[in-house]
Amino acid sequence: MERSEIFDKIVDIASDVLGVDASSITEKTTFDDLNADSLDRLQLVTAMEDEFELEIDDEKLMTIASVSDAIEAIESAQED
């Protein structure tokens, strides 16, 4: 899957889960920028795993702080 497709899906998920305007999200947007607390982040990751039908390993989960990090984690999980 292309990086741009992954980005678009993550934007949709973040917009839905966090109730933020999708147009305000870029690859550099952090989840702190979106006022996501730890529960929100867990919901985001769960939604991403469901959407992409994969599992992000726990070590990688701890490093996801931005949309770009999430894209890289999904790309990495797809390669495994």
Image (cartoon, grey):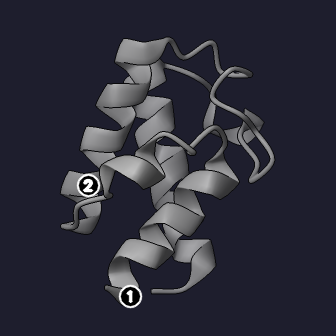
Contact (Cβ within 8 Å) of mark 2 with mark 1: no
Picture layout, residue 14 above or below residue 41? below
Picture layout, residue 39 above or below residue 61? above
Q: Position of residue 40 (x, y in %)?
A: 40, 19
Label ID, residue 49: 2
Give the tally of numbered discs: 2
- Point 71% across, 40% down: residue: 25
Q: Quadrant of the C terminus?
A: bottom left
> Which is nearer the eye, 35 or 55?
55
Label ID, residue 4: none
Amino acid type, mark 1: Glu
Residue 33 picture quarter: top right
In three-dimensional space, the C-alpha distance between marks 2 and 1, rounded to whole angstroms, equals 14 Å
Q: Is residue 17 left or right of residue 36?
A: left
- Point 41% across, 42% down: residue: 13
Amino acid type, mark 2: Glu
> Which is nearer the eye, 80 or 50?
80
Dot 2 or dot 1: first in sequence order is 2
Q: Position of residue 36 (x, y in %)?
A: 54, 17
Q: Position of residue 62 (x, y in %)?
A: 48, 39
Q: Secondary structure at mark 1?
A: helix
Picture layout, residue 26 above or below residue 5? above
Q: Residues within 10 Å of mark 1 (few under 14, many from 20)?
A: few
Residue 4 picture quarter: bottom right
Q: Give the number of the mark in front: 2 or 1.
A: 1
Picture layout, residue 27 above or below residue 7? above
* Residue assigned mark 1: 79
Q: Quadrant of the N terminus?
A: bottom left
Q: Residues within 10 Å of mark 2 (few under 14, many from 20)?
A: some
- Point 36% across, 73% down: residue: 77
Q: Secondary structure at mark 2?
A: helix
Residue reaching furthest to the right: 28
